[in-house]
Amino acid sequence: MNKTPKKVGYFKSYDGTKIYYEVRGEGKPIVLCYGIGCLINHWNHQVKYFSKGYQTIVFDYRGHHKSDSPEDRSQLSFDAHAQDLHALLNHLQIKKASFWGHSWGVQVLIRTYDMFPEIFENLVFVNGFMRNPISGMFGSDMAESFFQLFKSGYNVLPESLGYLWRAGVTNPLAVQFSALAGGFNIELTKLSDIEIYARGLTSMDLKSFIELFDYMMKYDGSPVLERIKVPCLIIGGTKDSVTPQTFQEEMHLKIKGSQFLMIPYGSHCTQLDMPDFVNLKIDQFLLKNKFTPTN
């Protein structure tokens, strides 16, 4: 990812689930939380830039990639993810950190703040949402209906649906469609980054993914927003059809004193589309709030 020395490791969370993490750089800690089914590489531009003056920490959620999936599927809830973040800081002997979330990672951070507000120095939300994002996605209920149909089909024919999932997600046409639908700006984001995301998604245990997606649809963190008392930067993209601007606007209105920034031509992955601009704005936000680098 970059030339900054990398420390990798695992720790056992509250229920014994092994969680994978990577640490780079020195200084004040920044914890980066990607979206559902995504990968650590979704933050590669930010890690490369900010690890020069901060300690950047990335990790895989439970049920994702190098971390374990709990046998008890109820332990894929947002409460479980919040406890994992708390355990991660305890493992690294960190009392407080800057937490950044992308997409579903924002829901994770909202629930974590609700449970452990004392560990937060500040927050950065990128293309995030606080409640079910697929209700009304693309201007209709088609996405939500498709998920319920897919979930029902998986319960009946798990092997067949698993095969179709892997074949469909990695299909070059599907990759192109996800970009055109607002998931990525194909003119700005490298196609290789989109393909890596597709491969990572299919490497997940599909049953775990469905459970996580179900929790995403059911959780509503709206009541928590008015209780957030730390500095918060909210970033969205004008071309994001996955998480429309209304989600970011509502969060901005409810989080007192928050800073709101819309990225022109930004897709659902603005941190990949325009990394230099996004990094600059986050850097300015951190400095304004006295979260300063080591050099």
Image: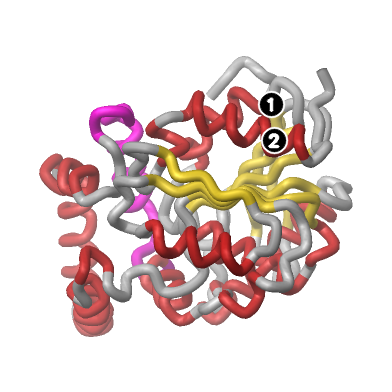
Q: Is 187 on the left or on the right of 286, as rendered?
A: left
Q: Is residue 61 or residue 139 the one in the foreground?
A: 139
Q: Main secondary structure of the magenta part?
A: helix
First-in-chain label (1 vs 2): 1
Q: Which residue does the numbered mark 2 point to in the structure image?
A: 56
Residue at x 80% of width, y 37% of height: 291
Q: Is 249 on the left or on the right of 101, as rendered?
A: left
Segment colored magenta:
186-208
Q: Which residue does the numbered mark 1 point to in the structure image?
A: 51
Which three-letter amino acid code belongs to the residue tagged 2? Thr
How many labels sit on residues?
A: 2
Specify how the rendered protein is coloured.
Answer: secondary structure
Q: Is residue 16 above or below residue 201?
A: below
Q: Is residue 133 above or below residue 50?
A: below
- From the top left corner, tell me how far across and down residue 219 is, in percent: 51, 78
- From the top left corner, tell me how far across and down residue 16 is, in percent: 70, 67
Q: Secondary structure at mark 2?
A: strand
Residue 134's quadrant in the figure? bottom left
Q: Is 187 on the left or on the right of 234, as rendered?
A: left
- From the top left corner, tell me how far across and down residue 249 is, in percent: 48, 61
Task: Please state, as top left, top right, bottom left or bottom right, where the C terminus lies in the image.
Answer: top right
**Contact, CB < 8 Å: mark 1 with mark 2?**
yes
Q: Is residue 289 or residue 131 the one in the foreground?
A: 289
Q: Is residue 212 above or below residue 60?
A: below
Residue at x 16% of width, y 54% of height: 168
